[in-house]
Image (cartoon, rainbow, N blue to C red):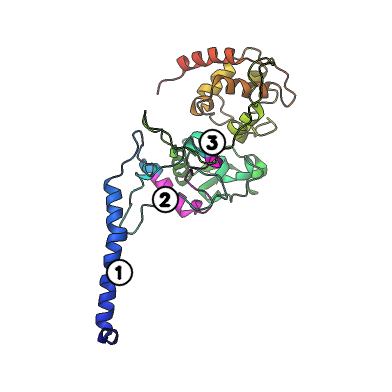
Amino acid sequence: MSLFHEHKKLFSLATILFGTLTLFVAVLPSQYNQENNAPLYGSIPLTKEQEAGRQIYIREGCVGCHSQQVRNVDMDKTWGDRPGIAADYALSTRKSIWQNAGTLMGTERTGPDLTNIGVRQPSQDWHLVHLYNPRTVMPQSIMAPYPWLFEIKSKAEKGDIKVNVPSEFMHGKIGDVVATEEALNLVAYLQSLKQVKLPDGTPNPDFLYKKEKKETDDTTGAGAKELDGAELYAAQCMSCHQQNGEGLKGAFPPLKGSKIVLDDNPEIMVGIIMNGYDAREDYGVMPAVGTNGNLKAEEVAAIMNHEKTSWGNTAKKVTPEQVQKLMDLAKLSAPKQ
């Protein structure tokens, strides 16, 4: 065939062929998905600061170690309440003609998944300390520190966001650690990462390959099996207050020997867990762990009992019934949003 000897015609035909394939295989399906996909009800677009933080997240290569996708397998339950769906990424639109939408789903989990990190860890103070030196709050962490997102000043000025970093984690520097605008924007983006609930009546996608739990006959005992307070503490509290309950000096208060923990009247302790706490200049703001995590009275009681009887603490235990009554009071006294 003479066509194979006329390179201009051959290349023109190849260009038309691949152009047609691209149109029907990539462009038109993508356009269809764009027009027939919408964010979930309750999804909130990123603010200017959060979008700036997203760009820093991309710039610093966070996507190389952290994913933002909850797969539909049982082992991913720890990262979200349900598997991810396409609508979760509908707000990730193209930012410019040169920049793709960039859902930042990731392909590797050297670090934990961040799909729901805004719920799991809503504390700005924790994120800032963690970014400056991850070993401060997680001794076993292999994450790189990001000290260039902070300034070291001889003394923090009015309006500065001071980061309470213990001296041994200061990278050999002396002074007050102050968060830059970039650090604050990055944290704002991380705090925005929250899995949106599906609309009422919409069935949750199932997690596959569920582990079957053997049920034991507990009818002869004194009721239902008590929840594992140590496990709940590890999931909800340990990142700040540490495994030994001693907290971090200048960052997070200790629970070991705490007057609030040792108090036989649990009202203040329940109120702090459900509504958060911001009354100490020496420490960061504690988020409303119980409310943010939708913890039940049984779970809150288990956490409290673990704290009241660990690290040398010998306080009176609480019951779920006591906690439920105080949780109802805490809801009434919570500040209106």
Q: Looking at this view, is 77 or 102 the one in front? A: 77
Asked whether, in this view, residue 30 is left or right of residue 310, the answer is left
Whether residue 153 can be seen here = no
**Which residue is rendered at x = 59% and y = 29% of the image?**
282
Q: Which mark lies nearer to you, 2 or 1? A: 1
| Mark 2 lies on residue | 55
The N terminus is located in which quarter?
bottom left
| Mark 1 lies on residue | 18
> Does 203 appear above or below 303?
below
> Does 74 appear above or below 261?
below
Where residue 271 sits: x, y (%)? 54, 18
Q: Looking at this view, is 35 or 146 the one in front? A: 35
**182 magenta-colored:** no
**Which residue is rendered at x = 52% and y = 44% of the image?**
113
Asked whether, in this view, residue 327 is left or right of residue 1, the answer is right
Q: Which mark lies nearer to you, 3 or 2? A: 2
Q: CA distance from mark 1 to mark 3?
A: 52 Å
The three-letter code of the residue at mark 3 reads Asp
**Magenta range:** 51-76
Whether residue 110 can be seen here = yes
The C terminus is located in which quarter?
top left
Where residue 239 sits, quadrant-wise, is top right
Q: Which mark lies nearer to you, 1 or 3? A: 1
Q: Earlier in the sequence, mark 3 or mark 2?
A: 2
Residue farthest along the right direction in this orientation: 312
Q: Secondary structure at mark 2?
A: helix
Q: Earlier in the sequence, mark 1 or mark 3?
A: 1
| Mark 3 lies on residue | 125
